[in-house]
């Protein structure tokens, strides 16, 4: 952990030796998000493929030399990370693609990739002596924070928008969070949380503002690299809301590239929903991001004002990648296809990744010769009402053999 040289502003590029109060660049009014700079020369001595091979930890803490956390604060979290990387052979033959892998982050302790950032938030809050952590969230940041904080004995105050799905809301209550349900959208919940955090001095887990959290999210791509023996795919596909996950994936790739551990840096495909696509529109029109509506079934990526625009846009541009938008209908169809073909149930925002891949594959952006990693960012059980609506509730049949046979024939289960 002591290998942090400083913090650089992603907007004005000023470097700070210590993290400024408020966590963002004091010189930039808005969007002065900081990026942690590591001392790679030092890290190289304690972090390499040989040492990793001998490391028996099965959580994100196996990458501790590349994380901004001290070891003694890592003991109080859930076992986050080291999720499976499946070969998606059925999906590969269905889409006539050379090789597909699916990184299933839906099996994290609270069911989403957000656990990676929340584990870091909890460790940092313990380090700085806070007893309460707060955040605004469309759902998963909240539930992952509440779960990980409960394990560490910390209190949580969570601001959620009106449309947070019932599964995620229920998780918060199970983990004992104080839930502030804002009668508004995510933008409004975010502003409320910011004010309350300032007033009460709670630890801030708002992912874009807190530069340490992207470092947690990057562990998903550190794992992908290690699981692939450091032979990288042509593409990594991930859905985008605030842009922190995408930024995290890129940070991992740039870390590993600087440490000369990977053969190449994959292109990144960032997927948004057509009902909320500020990144896609900025990318296609080559202009700064504009506030967008939050009109999609994929609640985790319904982010009208993304909080990490510079890092996420950089990730796409520097890898020669692309942003793409998909309709809600295609998202729900992709959910079904992923479940049918690979036995993985993804929530709508995570299914967007798969839908984005299908679209990019159809358009030839991703070719038949490419190797692709799809990241499942969240578990489908988090939002069953929307899933059931899309998948169709099975009819009730009379408890008779006749009714059974009629039904099985209709379904094609028997001749
Ligand atoms: C948060 C989230 C995303 C997007 O991550 P951002 O950092 O907001 O871009 C995608 N999928 C799921 C399931 C999420 O919870
Ligand atoms: Zn700045």
Image (cartoon, grey):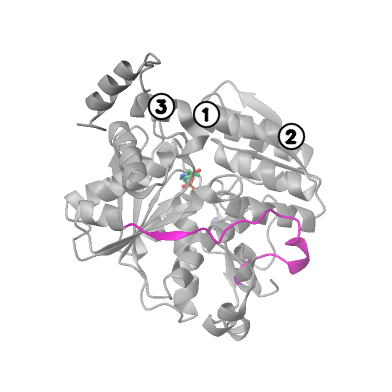
Q: Position of residue 295 (x, y in %)?
A: 39, 28
Question: Mark 2 highlights which residue?
Answer: 176
Residue at image coords 76%, 56%:
76
Q: Position of residue 401 (x, y in %)?
A: 34, 19
Q: Is residue 128 above or below residue 414?
A: below
CB atoms of marks 1 and 2 within 8 Å? no
Q: Which residues are magenta?
A: 66-88
Give the secondary structure at mark 2. loop
Which image quadrant is residue 351 in? Answer: top left
Q: Circle 1 — which element?
A: loop
Number of the front mark, 1 or 3: 3
Of 212 and 231, nearer the camera is: 231
Question: Which mark sits nearer the N-terminus, 2 or 3?
Answer: 2
Q: Residue 289 appears in which quarter of the rendering?
A: top left
Task: Identify residue for label 1.
Answer: 165
Residue occupied by mark 3: 388
Disc 3 secondary structure class: helix
Residue 286 seen in render: no
| Residue 32 included in the magenta stretch of the image | no
Say which of 284 and 116 sits in front. 116
Horizontal relation, residue 279 to residue 142: left or right = left
Q: Under 8 Å from ligand 1: the CB of mark 3?
A: no
Q: Quadrant of the C terminus?
A: top left
Q: How many marks?
A: 3
Q: Is residue 325 left or right of residue 13?
A: left
Residue 68 is inside the magenta segment: yes
Assess disc 1: are there few (<14), some (14-19) or many (≥20) residues with their C-alpha within 10 Å of its C-alpha. Answer: many
Question: Which of the two labelled residues, at mark 1 and mark 2, occupies the earlier sequence position?
Answer: 1
- Is the residue under label 3 in contact with that under label 1 (CB below 8 Å)? no
Between residue 315 and residue 238, name the one nearer to us: 238
Looking at the magenta stretch, what is its main secondary structure? loop
Which residue corresponds to the image point at 48% horizontal and 74% vertical from the top-left?
256
């Amino acid at each position: 952990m002591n290998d942090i040289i400083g913090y650089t502003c992603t907007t004005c590029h000023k470097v700070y030796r210590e993290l400024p109060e408020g966590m963002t660049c004091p010189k930039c009014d808005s969007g002065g998000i900081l990026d942690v700079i590591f001392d790679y020369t030092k890290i190289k001595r304690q972090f390499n493929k040989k040492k990793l091979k001998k490391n028996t930890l099965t959580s994100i803490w196996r990458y501790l030399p590349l994380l901004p956390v001290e070891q003694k604060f890592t003991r109080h979290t859930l076992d986050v990370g080291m999720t499976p990387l499946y070969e998606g052979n059925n999906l590969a033959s269905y889409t006539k693609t050379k090789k597909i892998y699916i990184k299933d982050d839906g099996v994290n302790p609270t069911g989403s990739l957000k656990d990676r950032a929340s584990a870091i938030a909890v460790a940092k809050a313990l380090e700085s002596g806070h007893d309460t952590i707060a955040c605004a969230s469309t759902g998963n940041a909240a539930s992952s924070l509440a779960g990980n904080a409960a394990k560490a004995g910390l209190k949580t105050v969570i601001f959620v928008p009106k449309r947070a799905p019932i599964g995620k809301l229920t998780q918060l209550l199970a983990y004992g969070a104080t839930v502030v349900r804002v009668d508004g959208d995510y933008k409004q919940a975010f502003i409320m949380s910011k004010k309350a955090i300032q007033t009460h001095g709670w630890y801030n887990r708002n992912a874009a503002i807190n530069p340490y959290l992207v470092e947690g999210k990057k562990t998903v791509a550190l794992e992908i690299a290690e699981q692939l023996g450091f032979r990288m795919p042509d593409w990594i596909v991930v859905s985008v809301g605030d842009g922190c996950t995408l930024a995290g994936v890129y940070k991992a790739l740039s870390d590993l590239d600087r440490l000369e551990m990977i053969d190449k840096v994959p292109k990144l495909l960032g997927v948004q929903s057509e009902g909320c696509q500020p990144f896609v529109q900025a990318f296609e029109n080559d202009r700064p991001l504009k506030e967008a509506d939050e009109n999609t079934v994929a609640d985790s990526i319904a982010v009208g004002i993304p909080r990490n625009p510079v890092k996420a846009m950089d990730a796409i541009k520097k890898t020669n990648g692309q942003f793409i938008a998909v309709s809600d209908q295609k998202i729900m169809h992709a959910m079904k296809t992923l479940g049918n073909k690979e036995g993985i149930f993804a929530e709508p925002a995570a299914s967007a990744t798969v839908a984005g891949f299908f679209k990019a594959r159809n358009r030839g952006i991703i070719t038949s010769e490419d190797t692709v990693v799809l990241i499942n960012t969240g578990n489908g059980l988090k939002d069953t009402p929307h899933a059931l609506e899309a998948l169709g509730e099975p009819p009730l049949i009379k408890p008779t053999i006749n009714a059974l046979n009629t039904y099985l024939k209709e379904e094609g289960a028997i001749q």
